Image (tube, coloured by chain):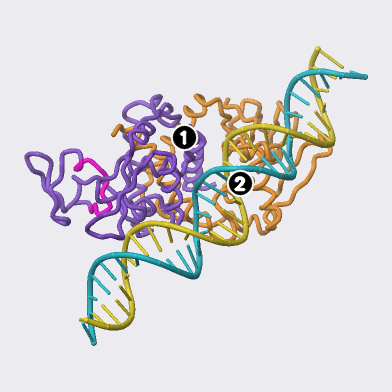
Chain colours: A purple, B orange, C yellow, D cyan
Amino acid sequence: MKQTEQIRSLLNRLARLDAGEGWAGDLNPAQRDALDYLARANRFSRSPSHVAEYLDTTRGTMSQTLKALVRKGYLSEKRSIMDKRVVSFTLTDQGQKATSDINIINRGLDDLNVSDRKDLHKGLTDLLESVLKKSGGKAFGICHTCRHFSKESQGGFCSLLSEPLTELETKQICHEQDSA
Amino acid sequence: MKQTEQIRSLLNRLARLDAGEGWAGDLNPAQRDALDYLARANRFSRSPSHVAEYLDTTRGTMSQTLKALVRKGYLSEKRSIMDKRVVSFTLTDQGQKATSDINIINRGLDDLNVSDRKDLHKGLTDLLESVLKKSGGKAFGICHTCRHFSKESQGGFCSLLSEPLTELETKQICHEQDSA
DNA sequence: TTGCAATAGTTTCGACTCGCCACTAATTAA
DNA sequence: TTAATTAGTGGCGAGTCGAAACTATTGCAA
């Protein structure tokens, strides 16, 4: 068996072990993935389309998942005033609380030493980058690593959207992020 | 965001990108995962229970998935004579053909250099080992790395099952595998 | 300005996974 | 010879999945 196939197999198996724990509470893995994304995305990146693209699924499927999360009280929904087609989601207190769970992958990573963990992080980051390049997918990187970002005394500024950014926002995921 | 959370997130995102491709043909990701496992498992490790445990799901769910794979012509089913409760699956020609697909993760890995790929492989292997230790899961490792295995001129021998093994079988996954 | 294409989101469809639980049949232990 | 265990199946309700049809809004261009 080729090494690349082994790596792919390991990746999938670890993700399945993670998903097996994703059923905690009344959430399923897909709902948990969506909630985790929304907890880390900035205010320009919280629409059904963005979550769908990040999680590599369709808008239709994601619409259902988000509807379930709203119904269960994890998210609240708001229509944009600027563009009345756009919807944006925010985590409720219950949603915030649900994102801080410790799971089996985190506990497993505690056993690795600092250097190995750093290597693993870099390896996965590099792999994701090359996969996204080949598939044409967006990076969904962190705001302050973007070529449209400029730092200011308090937070920063996005030259693409012409918007000032709070300190917190500069550390969140942006769907427009494009590495400097 | 903590580094362990970032790693978990990367793992899940890569697995989702892989799963997105898993819909190739008339198979869905769960069916493809089961088929991939069966293609690599030895003759003692091809029952619904084994696939279910490997993929961290229930026997009930797996029973359905395997039934779908038989119906679609990817697997054939055989009841054991020794223990009439036991069922074992074998890949048909169509099943064999379906396992050799190249996918986006493999293509992405081609961009990494040999050393980084080796590090990634080791990092994921170590992580899986420590996760399995914490969750009490079985390793499902390769036969010839097992403490019950002894090498012979042609293939080997399993002292646990008291069975001679062909050369090919010593390189397959065994549900009884326990590292030497 | 009207008229049409593009975009954002929703809904419905059929196939299927998922955990859970109840069930049957076969095997093993007491 | 019961009783417990093990292997597998089947059904339930919730929900994911891609695909496709649909509404509403926005943007663009003639």
Residue at point 16%, 53% (across, down): A148
Amino acid tagged 2: Ala
Picture coordinates of residue B160, whole percent (x, y):
71, 26
SS at badge 1? helix
Residue range in magenta is: A169-178
Give the camera-side residue of D22 and B13. Answer: D22
Residue D4, located in which quarter of the rendered image? top right
Q: Earlier in the sequence, mark 2 or mark 1?
A: 2
Residue at point 59%, 56% (across, down): B27
Picture coordinates of residue B142, whole percent (x, y):
59, 36
Residue at point 47%, 27% (across, down): B130
From the viewer's perspective, is B68 left or right of A174? right
Q: Which mark is residue B125?
A: 1
Residue B79, located in which quarter of the rendered image? top right
Q: Is residue B62 visible?
A: no
Crowdedness of circle 2 by 10 Å Cα count: few (<14), some, many (20+)?
some
Residue at point 49%, 38% (across, down): A19
